[in-house]
Amino acid sequence: MDEKLVIASRVARELKSGMLVNLGIGLPTLVAQLLPDDLDVDFQSENGLIGLEPLPFEGLADDDLIDAGGRLVSAAAGATSFDSAMSFGLIRGGHMDVTVLGGLEVDEAGHLANWMVPGKMVPGMGGAMDLVAGAKRVIVAMTHTAKGASKIVPQCSLPITSSRRIDLVVTELAVIEPTAEGLVLRETAPGVSVDDVLAATGARLIVPDEVPVMAI
Amino acid sequence: MTKLIDLSDAVQKIPDGATLMIGGFLAVGAPLRLISELERQGKRDLTIIVNDTNRAGKGVGKLIAAKAVKKVIASHVGTNSDTQKQLLDGDIEVELVPQGTLAERIRAGGVGLGGFLTPTGVGTLVEADKPLLEIDGRTYLLEKPLRADFALVSAASADHKGNLVYALTARNFNPLMAMAADTVIAEAHQIVPVGCLPPDSVVTPGAVVDYLVAKEARHG
């Protein structure tokens, strides 16, 4: 299974019916496609929509209806649109049950860095800082390593997105929960041992006696 | 009386060096005809307040490519390779603002508030030298209002009084910006007689709109 599908499938299991959910650009967007049919989740898009749905058929696109990544999308029955102040009122105001974001680094304090690499790539934070500051639950969906280097580090070397401790990290190798005591290894991916995860991780991981295999 | 004017006359009101708020999110809901006319008239040294700089050569990306912009205030400039290059080469000044903070700074500027307190950015580079205040045990950053000389906004429909109606995700920053500039120029897909827009559907009251231009050349 493709590593991104492993990550997105596992993240999808964190969503429950009735939740208002914001998916970040890139890998997190895959989560919407992997939800069980009986799950009734409302997706919010930071550019001003609740009720985001994938485009049903070619030719039905509306040029005024895109997701935060600029892709043409559809609006579900019961969707609502609003301006950017309202959109971020929903995000900052504690109305967002879950946000799923990509990451460049997560550290032992549970800090996320995902908006710039000084001197090399300065895309900007977009809505990420508001989402991490305001969502009830922040899940980071990212590959475990980049060019062989662990993205889970003792302390972020890149500028952090928020001083808030994020709630869960899901990679193709493991599910890791940042806690007050540090990063706890909660699950390993199918076919991946605890030692494999430890070898691929640059940060200290707390390993409980029981580490179940990730359900995907 | 109508607020509809000729496209080139509208843009001639904007001097070099002006500060412009320009609506749109990745160019959806951006006043594309006004932007193209800014480029055609060769405006220089602009400061633009935008959510993003779109993609290279598209939407406000045309102004970046034409080196018409000296400073950008935006939440995201990663989708435009020209902005990235000019930024890393030191040819353009970019002030990055979290998107919710950008929206709220514009809103504050338009509704007469001296700023607001937000948890967003506390403990990050965004904090810089801004005052921190603790309210009921939580730390907030003081963010100041933003205003501009001109707001260039885009709407689905307008009537000749300037009442504006928006469509879906093309609304984004437009209604906020229409409140926060000395002069507001709105570009609309269709311009209808006064009385055609139901009052409950109007989002931006025509009272704040100074000039209208049509999105299609055949109208204006």
Image (cartoon, helix red, strand yellow):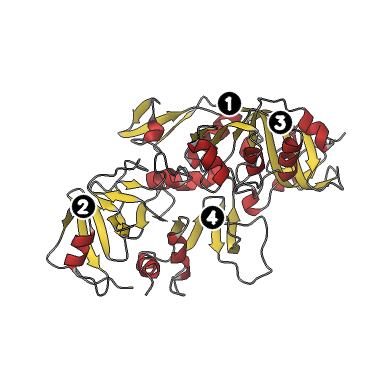
Left or right: B174 in relation to B138:
right
Q: Residue at x 43, y 47 (%)?
A: A128
Q: Residue at x 69, y 37 (%)?
A: B152
Q: For marks 3 and 2, give the CA distance.
A: 51 Å
Please state which amino acid type lies under the numbered disc 3.
Lys
Secondary structure type for disc 2: loop
Foreground disc of the pair 3, 1? 3
Q: Are marks 2 and 1 on the same chain?
A: no
Q: Is residue A53 visible?
A: yes
Q: For marks 4 and 3, give the CA distance.
A: 29 Å
The residue indicated by pointer 4 is A69
Q: Nearer the viewer, residue A132 or B80?
A: B80
Q: For marks 2 and 1, give the CA distance.
A: 48 Å
Subunit under mark 4: A
Please state which amino acid type lies under the numbered disc 4.
Gly
Question: Within 10 angstroms of label 4, few (less than 14), some, or many (20 or more) residues?
Answer: some
The residue indicated by pointer 3 is B43
